[in-house]
């Protein structure tokens, strides 16, 4: 089969490897936010499609037999487009979207609906681990009373628009002890992240639980 995976998460990479090994012609579609994504089995396509109609056109022109949505819980627009495109192109759709994290009884979560409310929930003089993508950082420049530790996969091309910050380049550790060490070393008082689910970035949640650090967690 010719298969298009809407991916970008660990589970999608594992699925691509499995399907390629089974003999399928697999293309993984990535948003392109990481400069050097990890190698994937099969083909890779970078960038958007131009909405549901653009995705449907791609499915038709490339004679895709199966569309798989294997994105994180926040990729709501592409998931919506996938449903519409599969109908427009008459291509079967399988949904393997990642489930969000569930709150542990010892977690100190401040659950908010969006990033604006996350920004407003930060106490004055807080030292915050900002575990978000580059495209969301501008929103937090209004909080001049906050120090940010910003974790990014790639080195930014220019200075971030934040009043006070420190950069931490690299992916989060999957070992909560290592994440705990980062939080302690930088005197982190709060974490801001989205409830992206999965295991890859969960260690910071476990570390925060151990240190009793509040996590301002965004549901949308």
Image (tube, grey):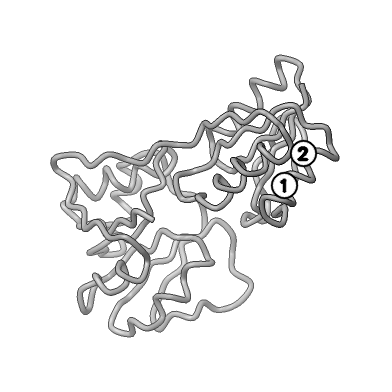
Q: Is residue 151 left or right of residue 119?
A: right
Q: Quadrant of the N terminus?
A: top right
Q: Residue at x 83, y 32 (%)?
A: 63
SS of the residue under disc 1: helix
Where is residue 41 shown, x and y percent of the image? 71, 30
Quarter residue 112 falls in: bottom left
* Residue 11 rendering spot, x and y as whole percentages: 53, 32
User: Residue most toward the top?
Assistant: 22
Q: Which mark is residue 55?
A: 1
Give the distance between the C-alpha atoms of the residues marked 2 and 1, in whole angstroms. Answer: 6 Å
Cβ–Cβ under 8 Å for marks 2 and 1 = yes
Q: Residue at x 36, y 57 (%)?
A: 193
Apparent side of residue 52 relative to residue 117 in the rendered image (left or right): right
Residue most extreme to the right:
61
The residue singled out by tag 2 in the image is 59
For the C terminus, which image quadrant? bottom left
């Amino acid at each position: 089969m010719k298969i298009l995976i809407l991916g970008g998460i660990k589970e999608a990479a594992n699925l691509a490897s499995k399907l390629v090994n089974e003999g399928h012609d697999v293309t993984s579609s990535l948003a392109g936010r990481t400069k050097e994504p990890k190698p994937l089995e099969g083909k890779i396509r970078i960038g958007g499609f131009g909405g549901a109609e653009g995705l449907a056109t791609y499915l038709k022109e490339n004679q895709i037999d199966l569309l798989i949505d294997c994105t994180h819980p926040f990729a709501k627009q592409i998931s919506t487009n996938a449903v519409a495109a599969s109908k427009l192109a008459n291509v079967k759709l399988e949904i393997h979207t990642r489930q969000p994290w569930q709150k542990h009884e010892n977690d100190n979560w401040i659950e908010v609906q969006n990033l604006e409310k996350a920004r407003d929930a930060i106490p004055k003089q807080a030292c915050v681990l900002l575990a978000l993508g580059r495209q969301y950082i501008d929103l937090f420049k209004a909080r001049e009373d906050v120090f940010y530790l910003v974790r990014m996969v790639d080195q930014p091309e220019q200075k971030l628009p934040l009043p006070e910050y420190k950069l931490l380049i690299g992916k989060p550790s999957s070992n909560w002890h290592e994440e705990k060490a980062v939080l302690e070393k930088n005197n982190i008082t709060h974490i801001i992240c989205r409830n992206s689910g999965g295991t890859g970035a969960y260690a910071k949640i476990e570390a925060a639980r151990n240190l009793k650090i509040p996590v301002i967690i965004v549901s949308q």
